[in-house]
Image (cartoon, rainbow, N blue to C red):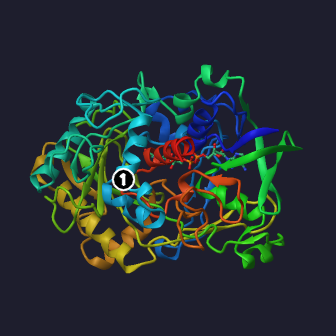
Amino acid sequence: HFDWLVLGAGSAGSVIARRLSDDPGLSVGLVEAGGFPADPDIDDPLQWPALPGRAFDWAYRTEPQPHTADRCHDWPRGRLVGGSSCMHAMAHVRGHPEDFEPWRHAGGDRWSYASLLPAFTRSESFSGGDTSGRGTDGPLDVILPDDAVSPVVRAYMAAGNALGAPELGDHNRGRLNGTAPNSLTLRNGRRLSVATAYLDPQILARDNLTLLTEHRVDRLLIEGPRATGILARHTGQPVTLTADRIVICAGAIASPMLLMRSGIGSADTLRQIGVDCRFDSPEVGRNLQDHLLVLGNVYRARQSVPPSRLQHSESLMYLDSSDLSARHTQPDIVLACVVAPSAAPGFETPPYGTAYTLLCGVTHPASRGVVKPGSADPDQPPLIDPHYLSTDHDRATFRTALQLARQLGHHKALEAWRDCEVLPGADMRSDAELDAFIARTASTHHHPCGTCRMGRDETAVVDPDLRINGLGNAFIVDASIMPAIPSGPINAAVVAIAEHWAAGLKTP
Ligand code: FAD
């Protein structure tokens, strides 16, 4: 029996287990389906694109998407201590202050950007120069490796500046529009997962913290309006654990699935899979949001492209497409330059070193999807339907993004590098052709979130304390609670949510 059970040792769960166990008077059990990271490629920043599909990947797959040429999209998620932070691309982006306005509307002032800032700061150890507004003694090392940025990426940033994009220098000071090298969570040149940062051997040795690996949680045990524990499986055998309070940190796919298997979800969905409905919470699994990136606007190089010294994607560029020189507005488009030829499956990719790629995406897609179980069997994969590109807004903004990428790619600042455009290809010009290219090549940027939406309204899945509506003593703290997706990669915001929630427990 524990005071607290934390379910999932990913980005959020690692923070929660650390912060709860800071109180020696509390016993904390941390339950993780996977094991400790053992694959040496996890540590190597250059290897992250090779990690999906390995044994520690949940390897989810979406339903066919009508607006992306009926493709099913692979959705890697980490199944190991550290969760998806053991597979991610290490970019650290807090987001734009306005990204958190929907959070404030949903949960009140304590979910505004200003209220979250102390949590962002507390999580970081920033070593990239000017430390004002940045944390310097948090668990998560954040570097700003300006001098390691590839010369091709430098030229792409110069092209952006020539088109009006402000020279920002750092994404994490409250402004997002403009050019900056990516801030990365690296330590001594190696990946720093959130678990490595927050759960070092000293923390894991605490008497009041028990980490149970290879324990897959099937469902919550519920009596009346309270969760009393969990039913898990370890080496195929059922295990029951009990606790006074439970925090679910299983991520944007697994958290709603766990709720639904436990009888909390849409009564209709639960009836279809034969699970008794304990609490009709129709939005569980809904409000699914994700970023897509078009892979890619590929250019053959006229000189050899030096290999990346970082993690291939060295600089995201956020832009307000209505005014490229806008400094303070919320961006609607993101571009990136990858020091590698990067094309969607089905397209010919030039050899490494002979080409580079501009990627483009939409920061605030309007499409909303859904995740639900196809059956009550926890071993069956979830049905994931992100409804990608299902709105006119998303399709039109994507077209603008691709046009901007090409404008940048053809800019004279890239003259020394550009031989010719390989993809979509010089003859592809009409809106219809660009739309078709986007549909065939848009791929996940790996930021699913929103499926256990936080809010003050009665259909929200969790309330502003992140307490599950319908259960007095159980919470969800992970990417699923986001009411709306931030502009950039979301790991920094997930960590901030967890820090913020844990601090709120201490000072309610
Ligand atoms: P996770 O970190 O996924 O943690 C969930 C944990 O719960 C996992 O450890 C899982 O095994 C465990 N779990 C699930 N179900 C069960 C169960 N039934 N029983 C027990 N345990 C369970 N973000 C960025 O900010 N920057 C990037 O550069 C970036 N790149 C990415 C690249 C890739 C390939 C991927 C996959 C993600 C990327 N992300 C990036 C996204 C980021 O990693 C995630 O948004 C973040 O890690 C989510 O944190 P989480 O705590 O919500 O979930």
Whether label 1 lies within 8 Å of ligand 1 gets the answer no
Along the viewing direction, whichever of 373 and 172 lies nearer the viewer: 172
User: What's the residue at 24%, 66% (across, down)?
Assistant: 403
| Residue 417 location (% of width, % of height) | 18, 43
Q: Amino acid at mark 1?
A: Tyr
Res 134 quadrant in image: top left
- Can residue 468 be seen at all in this image of the molecule? yes
Q: Is 414 on the left or on the right of 45, as rendered? A: left
Q: Which residue is mark 1?
A: 113
Where does the image place residue 2, in percent across and percent down from the top left? Answer: 77, 38
Q: Residue furthest right?
A: 237
In-front residue for pair 225/281: 225
Q: Secondary structure at mark 1?
A: helix
| Location of the N terminus (image quadrant) | top right
Which residue is drawn at the image coordinates 24% and 28% (left, top)?
Answer: 129
The x, y position of residue 168, in whole percent, is 19, 45
Percent x, y of residue 312? 37, 39
Relative side of 437 to 49, left or right: left
The residue at 73%/65% (across/down) is 260
Q: Who is closer to the viewer here, 169 or 263? A: 263
Taking the image as shown, residue 103 lies to the left or right of residue 60, namely left
Depicted 359 relative to depicted 64: above or below: above
